Image (cartoon, grey):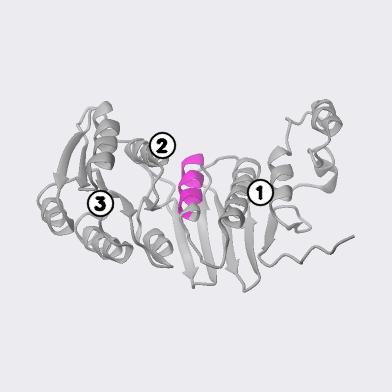
Amino acid sequence: MSAHCIPPDVSVSQTALVIDSGPELNELLNSVLSRDGWTIEHAANHEDALDLAKRDSFDLIITGRKTRGPEDIEFLRKIRGTRAHVRLIILADEWTPGDVLTAMREGAFSYFCAPFQPETVAETVRAAMNYPCWDDGIEVLSATPQWVRLMARCDIETADRLVLFLQNVRDPNISEDDRADIVAAFREILMNAMEHGGHFDPSQHVEISFVKARRAVMCRVKDPGHGFSQDELRHAVKTGSPEDLFSHIAVREEKGLRPGGFGLLMARKLVDELIYNEQGNEVVLVKYLDKPAQTAA
């Protein structure tokens, strides 16, 4: 994975190709893009968009919500054959299991499943507009429906993209509440790994694995750092008591450490198990999908 990127030439007008998504989304996308001076072209469908992309160079392509996920994936593959590095955001009203992973592997900038949240779509479009080095940030090393391995570059933009992909992975066997907990806990652990293990150095990468078993979801995150000692953990927030939330700050200041541990506290509350290796640079999150029934007292 390359850490090298060339910032865009802001003196040159950037152009976006937007495939029809209906009045509401079209208006949102036009508003976000035109605000920063982008030139916008519109296409009615994939065929028209592909013809335009072959003829002209675009910095960003956004698919229409009226198409199905597999159709968008096929369109993505065709675009990659013509414009290898163009940013492409997929909006899909209909999707099939595995579409998000395939989109990630094929090099989509982002993927949204309906129902769409306008604010999140707008934020992602802005990120795609402003983030120069994106297409080597996430590398899928291997993938099956049950087990995914990937590498992610240590920067906040890549973390945000990866979390957004994960938010749009839908599994009928995982409840919305459990999915939200898994995503939130993963984000805290990922940011912790990138900050403390990788120091937000884009030349460094975090190793990540997702495993979906019949009764549990597991996530492994390994950062490139040297880990931490159990003594350092004692000075992070570990409990939810007000005394701990405030007293740890003074202790860490005495040790010359910045306040920390809030993300770990949140992750511990969202998943069922949080297991660190001996070195302290690798963690496994476990979320059980079939909680044991509560017995009456």
Q: State the extent of the magenta-drawn residues as a range.
A: 156-165
The numbered disc on residue 225 is: 1
Q: Secondary structure at mark 1?
A: loop
10 Å neighbourhood of mark 3: few (<14), some, or many (≥20)?
many
Is residue 120 or residue 53 the one in the foreground?
120
Question: Which amino acid does the dot numbered 1 rest on?
Answer: Gly
Q: Earlier in the sequence, mark 2 or mark 3?
A: 3
Question: Going 56% across and 68% down the picture, which residue do you hit?
Answer: 173
Is residue 185 or residue 130 the one in the foreground?
185
The numbered disc on residue 64 is: 3
Look at the image and say whether residue 158 sits in the magenta stretch.
yes
Residue 6 percent coordinates (x, y):
33, 39
| Residue bearing the label numbered 2 | 119
**With respect to residue 281, does 172 lie above or below?**
below
Residue 104 percent coordinates (x, y):
40, 59
Q: Quadrant of the C terminus?
A: bottom right
Question: Going 43% across and 67% down the picture, which residue do you hit?
Answer: 98
Q: Secondary structure at mark 2?
A: helix
Question: Which amino acid does the dot numbered 3 rest on?
Answer: Gly
Residue 128 percent coordinates (x, y):
35, 41
Residue 261 percent coordinates (x, y):
74, 39
**Left or right: residue 253 compared with residue 266:** right
